[in-house]
Image (cartoon, helix red, strand yellow):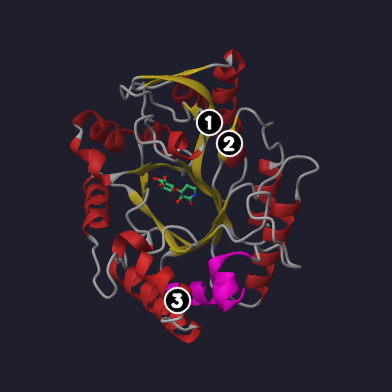
Amino acid sequence: SDSLRALADDYNLKIGSAIIPFDLDNPAYAKVAGEQFSSVTPGNEMKWETVEPTRGTYDWSKADRLVSFAEAHGQQVRGHVLLWHNQLPGWLTSGVADGSITKAQLRDLLQKHITDEVAHFKGKIWQWDVANEFFADSWSPQPLANGMNGDDFWVKNLGTGIVADAFRWAHAADPKALLFYNDYNITGADGTNAKFQAAYDFVKSLKEQGVPIDGVGEQGHLDTQYGFPTKMQQDLQAFADLGLRVAITEADVRTFVEQTDDKQTPTDQLAMSAQPFYYDQMLKACLAVRSCISFTVWGFGEADSWVPGWFTGEGYAGIYNTDVQPKTAYYTLQQDL
Ligand code: XIL
């Protein structure tokens, strides 16, 4: 019956969730958000398209609401995300596309974005996801020689060196925040370690160049139709051995479902046991690595999960159901702590 956050305190581990600030209007949701978690991440509200919808006009209100909630509940905040190819404001991408924003201007706009955002939240953010999803895989199959995604908006326009610059700008604006590189599938399974290796070589070279990077986040978006990435602990440890913190930053475990009204019923009975097992294995991988400082789920409820909107026919990915009641996966995490 102990909360996840209370149990995890014994390990000096923060248990987090992505939170949609608007959902805090629901008292049942807000109660779980405050009681169970010691860290929160805004699901979308610190992304560039949200904070600067119109060029030159900032809107921090949604993110500020979550930061205030965190302060009121003794929670840390993971800032998410400063440099990413997705959820950029339309004025920025269209300006680059039509040539009205030059590459030099784009670089200046990015520096200003990172500097202003990190400064706005200075002293309030524990970990920043500075750069997100830069490596090629089957979703973005145009690898450069170093394994980075050659099709990435930032890489195409400003080159791979922009990642190091982003860390330097973020560090200058809030020297005490822990700065993370974040990605999915960078902890691998046997035989499919290419993305891990590319990310590993890259962050190692950042460290060697003296770039202010403090950590690596494995998102942890898993799917019961694929095997569990059995090298998660080993690969987290490899990052840790470079002198970096590590974290699981966006854990969820999706599966195929039948959708009736707002209820999602898994169609594969094996998935019902695979899901808690995958959560269990992810948390255990983190617990086994001393430098793993936080384990965050990407939305604890089913209602606010990104999965149904992004993966056709899939859902049931969280640790609470649509009625904000804990699922088996929740009890499995509780058992592990
Ligand atoms: C997702 C949000 O959860 C959705 O609401 C949004 O529509 C798209 O982005 N990796 C990330 C997160 O780093 O920012 C993404 O969040 C999920 C994948």
Q: Amino acid at mark 3?
A: Asp
Disc 2 vs disc 1: Cβ atoms closer than 8 Å?
Answer: yes
**Residue 319, position in %: x, y?**
43, 28
Badge 2 element: strand
Badge 1 element: strand
Q: Residue at x 58, y 13 (%)?
A: 269
- Badge 2: how crowded within 10 Å, few (<14), some, or many (20+)? many
Q: Residue at x 50, y 23 (%)?
A: 335
Q: Residue at x 30, y 67 (%)?
A: 52
Q: Quadrant of residue 141?
A: bottom right
Residue denoted by label 2: 222
**Residue 128, position in %: x, y?**
43, 61
Q: Amino acid at mark 1?
A: Arg
Residue denoted by label 1: 254
Badge 3 element: loop
Q: Amino acid at mark 2?
A: Leu
Q: Which residues are magenta?
A: 151-171
Q: Does residue 264 appear in this view? A: yes
Rendered image: mark on residue 98: 3
- Badge 1: how crowded within 10 Å, few (<14), some, or many (20+)? many
- Residue placed farthest to the bottom in the image? 104
User: Can you say which quadrant of the picture contains the N terminus?
Assistant: top left
**Residue 174, position in %: x, y?**
38, 72
* Real-space CA distance between mark 3 and mark 1, rounded to the nearest whole angstrom: 38 Å
| Residue 70: in magenta span | no
Q: Main secondary structure of the magenta part?
A: helix
Q: Is residue 201 left or right of residue 70?
A: right
